Amino acid sequence: MSLPIPVLVFRLTSRIKAFSQVDDSPTRKYGGTGLGLALSQRLCELIGGRITMESTVGVGSTFTIEIPAILGDPLTTSTLDLDELPSQVTSEQPVTIDESVPVVPVSNAIILVIDDDPTVGTMIQRLMASGEAYVVTATTGAEGLRLATDLVPDLIVLDLKLPDLHGLEVLARLRDNPELTNIPIVVLTIDEQSRRSITFPIAEYLVKPVALETLLEVVKRYCRPQSTSSTDHILLVEDDQRLAELLERTLRAAGWSVEVTFDGEAGLTAALTRPPGLILLDYMLPKLDGLQFLAQLRTDPIGQTIPVILMTARDLSTDERQQLAASADAIQHKANLDIETLITHIRTMLMHARSTSADSTVSG
């Protein structure tokens, strides 16, 4: 009789994680990407483990991670099916900070693969050199559009045969979005005839099956890792030393340089002396609070265009939000701090700031 495999079991309870722009309209809300869960699942599979989930809409989800105590003795049951996750959760209850969430270095290019065959994304990831690109796969058109909006990738690889939307409709929606319209799109499909139906600009049209060398050459041609400029450092103004240390460590791991100050006056001096690419600003600070900091920052020409994410431990009233709308770009609730989502949106805001700066330079 064979003995049972010793198993280590970990349970994590997750609830909705809030990150919002100051404008609360539906078109301005950020959502999470779900990348951390997919990475966790893959890591568990690599060491013979599994992830299972119990989820209740409006309440939250419990994820159970089981790994063999002796590596090399894989567990036999299937891993978590990501499609079982609820598509919409409305509660906003606090979560604990997970300091182990994998972080995508900002120097990595992001490739979004929209294909109902997930092996396409896996193949592209294996073709790319380590650290050269980070590949995210969406198996439906709707999921692909959501991830494209969340991540603003450097390259999109698009299949035309999708289970929910035709690839041509996905292409039209991508090109209709001002933030996505200039992203190179490589169409990779078995449908050779649809080439004539494409009226929107694309980078390449490849017909499956395609030689791996050809696919790699095309992807590398249009995909360039993000370069980090000297102004892409982040100023963190936070008097909670534990939170400041966590954020500083995480942001540095993502590839940014970080300057930390612990009161409003020191933060304002740092912002105007060495203008950062972005400011993470606590609401309640000694010497100068967040509102006073923003008022003085925005009156100085140097600080008028620096993106600011205001972090707060309490809910803001409508009046407070209206007061902040002209000076803060986004609000992060500390009780619902989601490191992965925060990193994603910092990256997006820095890219947008660089793009706006470049446009101003050209027009000037």
Image (cartoon, rainbow, N blue to C red):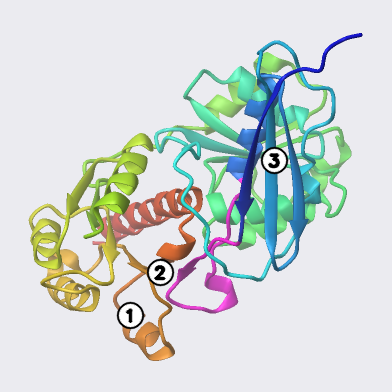
Q: Upstream in the sequence, badge 1 or badge 3?
A: 3
In this picture, residue 71 sits left or right of residue 208: left
Magenta region: 16-34
Q: Residues within 10 Å of mark 2 (few under 14, many from 20)?
A: many
In this picture, residue 359 sits left or right of residue 220: left
Whether the magenta-drawn stretch holds residue 266 is answered as no
Marks 1 & 2, CB-CB < 8 Å contact: yes
Residue denoted by label 1: 324
Task: Write the residue at 87% across / 10% down.
Answer: 2
Quarter of the C terminus within the rendering: bottom left
Viewer-nearest residue: 362 or 129:
129
Specify the amino acid type for callout 2.
Answer: Ile
Q: In the rendered structure, find residue 64 and report the number of the disc placed on it.
A: 3
In space, the residues marked 2 and 3 are separated at their CA atoms by: 31 Å
Task: Write the residue at 92% across / 8% down.
Answer: 1
Q: Upstream in the sequence, badge 2 or badge 3?
A: 3
Q: How many marks?
A: 3
Q: Residues within 10 Å of mark 3 (few under 14, many from 20)?
A: some
Q: Is residue 185 visible?
A: no
Q: In the rendered structure, find residue 266 and report the number of the disc placed on it.
A: none
Q: Secondary structure at mark 1?
A: helix
Q: Secondary structure at mark 3?
A: strand
Q: Secondary structure at mark 2?
A: strand
Residue 69 location (% of width, % of height) = 65, 18
